[in-house]
Amino acid sequence: MRALIILCFLYLSIGYGQKNIPKNYFIHPLDIPLAVSGTYGELRSNHFHSGIDLKTQGEEGLQVYAAASGNISRIKISHSGYGKAIYISHPNGYTSVYAHLQKFSPEIEAYVKKRQYAKESYEIELFPKAETLKVNKGDIIAYSGNTGGSGGPHLHFEIRDNRARPMNPLIFGIDVEDTKKPIINSLWLYSLDKKSHCNSSQKPIKLRLTPQKDGSFKTESISAHGQIGIGVSTIDQQNLSTNKNGIYEIITTVNGQENFRLTMNKFSFSETRYINRLIDYGYYKTNRSRISKLFVEPNNPLSIYSNVINNGKIKIEDSLSYTLKVFVKDFKDNTTTIHIPVEGKQEDEISKTKTTITQNEVKHKENFTYSSGIFDMYIPKGSLYEDTYLDIKTNGDTIHIHKDEIPLHKNMTLVFDVSKYSATDKKKLYIGRIVTKKKHYYNRTTRKGNRFSIRTRTLGSYTLFTDTKKPTIVPVNFSDKKWISAEKYLKIKINDEHTDIKSYRATINGKFVLMEYDYKTGMLKYDFNDKVIAAKENKFKLIVLDKVGNNNTFEATFYRKP
């Protein structure tokens, strides 16, 4: 009885929360037809997309409006991630977020620059008091851009609840024109225990899809037995965009009864990395296609599931017939349906999956340590979603830790003993992950005496690299002893071949000047409207440091009318 009361309370709470989502509270943050290049909940690398990406007609500088009245509660500027971003807290408890901005409105821009100059840093995070930067619905707060990790000009827009959980902006009435059905890339069946099989095999099988006259799909008849699960690779597109976006909802049924539902309405940032439990991670790393598993495996606490029976697993019994259906929906309820006829048949001879057994079994619920030669490794419990055998080999200064086909949920620690290197050499050493023979990624390396270490959530091959090259500095629109009165900006390109840029500092006539950095292009830019200088003759100095301490200094004199 008590359990029934609790369930009723939860149902009413959920229903009440959904019904009370304000539909007309937020307006569109752009004054153009909304074309979406990224949907809420879209599957990204190691995370779900937490908002919607709105196209800006391939341009920067479009006016961005406050979606509702409130106060600016947070401003963050970073080289990567959201770039320039504004957070507005609203009286109803929600927060709207606007990211990848080119610049802020004049009042906000002045507020930010004053503090950037005080801190002498382009990257900054501010939390204005409630009364400091108030805005009304429809006020211009910024201009759209391409800052941070953006892959092209657009506005990233979010709505978060009072617990900072991102929610789907479309459920608040943000309208996007969409009459297109979701697109199915592939459909798969998985055998989920040691005795189950599909078409006499325990390996995942890809099903052939045949289009039907009504727009649905039907697969060939499948023979199966035991616990099986469905996987689907799918995308969605809207009317004003050809981008391959994420879907809103997937439902599966068995003989007409719903047994699984995945809906992209709300999630928390703390759970977003469990995307690697939702997708077939190994398949994605090999084929660059994400298959969503329509069943819930152990150690998967995602809150996007509902109406799940038997964890979405489907029990197929011998000599019985089943009709499985998959419904893939977008927010406007455009639906693509897949019919899967299954005949229950227990086979005596099946092709079984083989587990490669190694000396290194990592238990999900236990810490794992490894030591060999100059290497020590620690994987904390809960890093793997299930017990796994890892293939670990060492060769000189290189350690091969399996392949990046198994996800890590937590950081492992990898330590190198560098005692054989001289003090001079150690200063330029760092640990990197090998991608190909000619390509590797720098890992942030911690140095404590003879022990260099990294923390990473990516399996693969790691070794020691040396970086002795200084960063490069190339002026773009000026040179020494030249006049640049007509220029609005002072532009310089910087680059580091091995470990990337760690920091930079610029001065004119000995005074700090703020230079905006776009890491995607390597461009540094000083805005003369900051009015730090008022002299005709100006001495510019720039110091650039890479991530192992190599530094380069550039100096030049330029002339400009006061």
Image: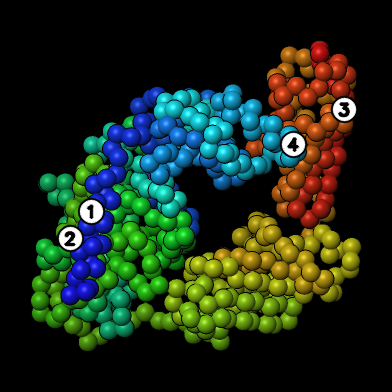
Q: Which residue is label 3 attached to?
A: 509
Q: Earlier in the sequence, mark 3 or mark 1?
A: 1
Q: Amino acid at mark 4?
A: Ala
Q: Is residue 119 visible?
A: yes
Q: Earlier in the sequence, mark 4 or mark 2?
A: 4
Q: Which residue is label 2 attached to?
A: 325
Q: Which residue is label 4 attached to?
A: 118
Q: Amino acid at mark 3?
A: Asn
Q: Nearer the viewer, residue 530 or 186?
A: 530
Quadrant that contains the C terminus: top right
Left or right, 219 with respect to 54, comes to left
Disc 2 to disc 1, C-alpha distance: 27 Å
- Quadrant location of residue 509? top right
Q: Nearer the viewer, residue 188 or 193?
A: 193
Quadrant that contains the N terminus: bottom left
Q: Amino acid at mark 1?
A: Gly
Image vertical order of residue 407 relative to residue 53, above or below: below
Image vertical order of residue 89 relative to residue 135, above or below: below
Instruction: Say which of marks 2 and 3 sits in front.
Output: 3
